Image (tube, rainbow, N blue to C red):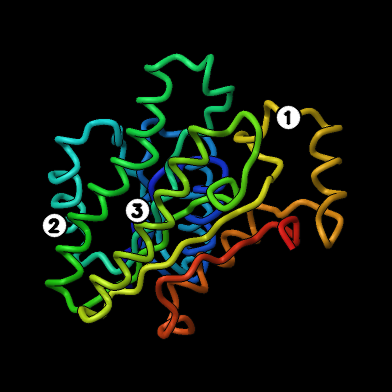
Amino acid sequence: MRNVLVTGGSRGLGLAISRKLALAQYRVIAIARRESAEIVAAIQEAERDQRGELHFRRFDLADISGIHDLVKSVRKQFGPIYGLVNNAALGTSGLLATMHDTRIERLVHLNVVSPLIVTKYVVRSMMADGGGRIVNITSVAGLTGYKGLAAYAASKASLIGFTRSLAREAGSLGINVNAVAPGFMDTQMTQGLSAEQLTRIARRSALGRLAEVDDIANAVEFLISEKARNITGTVMTIDAGNMA
């Protein structure tokens, strides 16, 4: 059974991805700061289903110095790491001119620095084990402009550049690196938007609706699978045609 790490895997999109991969017969190690009731229920569900496995590992990705030991301990407990989904992120919004410096620093730290360092040590493991799959969760905000999301968009745009460059670095080692760029979804990340705002966004899309977490989870499962063996360095946009 292949092992896949999912950061921010205890709730929202990360939990949906973790569940989807467990159903697809992977052994999923969900990493997050807190063990939510939802992840506990999902672990029990995976045990009953008996297709794949779902495990939880408590870790704060802001602790950069501890990431090496985290990856080492996961590999020691579960074996080779085949897949990594960099999902953990802060969705901080606000006008850049009035945003406090510490909020910007925290956002960039978690959205950019942490996934780079996690990937660094996971890639080393994949090199030793003969290949793997990396999927970075970015955002349509990293591809186009949205008022009030300058800092967030900067962090997500950086992941797109990271994805394309790492795909070049790691391709000869049998490691595929891709990104998924979700549009606006009705999740905790968009709780600051009113129902009217979400409805307006849905109307602007080609399909007249918002993307759902399962749509993104399906894309991640595909990119982790053998069906995507010749796909690398790409950004898959899933936004119901909002950017069409």
Q: CA distance from mark 3 to mark 2?
A: 13 Å
Residue located 29% across and 65% down the image = 166
Callouts 3 and 1 close, C-beta under 8 Å: no
Residue type, mark 1 in image: Leu
Q: Is label 1 in a helix, a strand or a loop? A: loop
The residue that disc 1 covers is 193
Q: Is residue 103 above or below residue 49?
A: above
Q: Is residue 101 above or below residue 214?
A: above
Q: Is label 2 in a helix, a strand or a loop? A: helix
Q: At which x and y percent is residue 179? A: 46, 62
The residue that disc 2 covers is 76
Q: Is label 3 in a helix, a strand or a loop? A: strand
Question: Which of label 3 and label 1 is nearer to you?
Answer: 1
Question: Which tag, 3 or 1, sits closer to the chain's start?
Answer: 3
Q: At which x and y percent is residue 85? A: 40, 57
Question: Which tag, 1 or 2, sits closer to the chain's start?
Answer: 2
Residue located 44% across and 79% down the image = 231
Q: At which x and y percent is residue 210? A: 76, 51
Callouts 3 and 2 close, C-beta under 8 Å: no
Residue located 14% across and 46% down the image = 68
Q: Is residue 54 above or below residue 106?
A: below
Residue type, mark 2 in image: Lys
Q: Which quadrant would the C terminus be assigned to in this image?
A: bottom right
Q: Which quadrant would the N terminus be assigned to in this image?
A: bottom left
Along the line of sight, which residue is nearer the eye, 34 or 92?
Answer: 92
Q: Mark on residue 29?
A: 3
Along the line of sight, which residue is nearer the eye, 181 or 88?
Answer: 181
Q: CA distance from mark 1 to mark 2?
A: 43 Å
Along the line of sight, which residue is nearer the eye, 124 or 112?
Answer: 112
Residue type, mark 3 in image: Ile
Question: Which tag, 3 or 2, sits closer to the chain's start?
Answer: 3
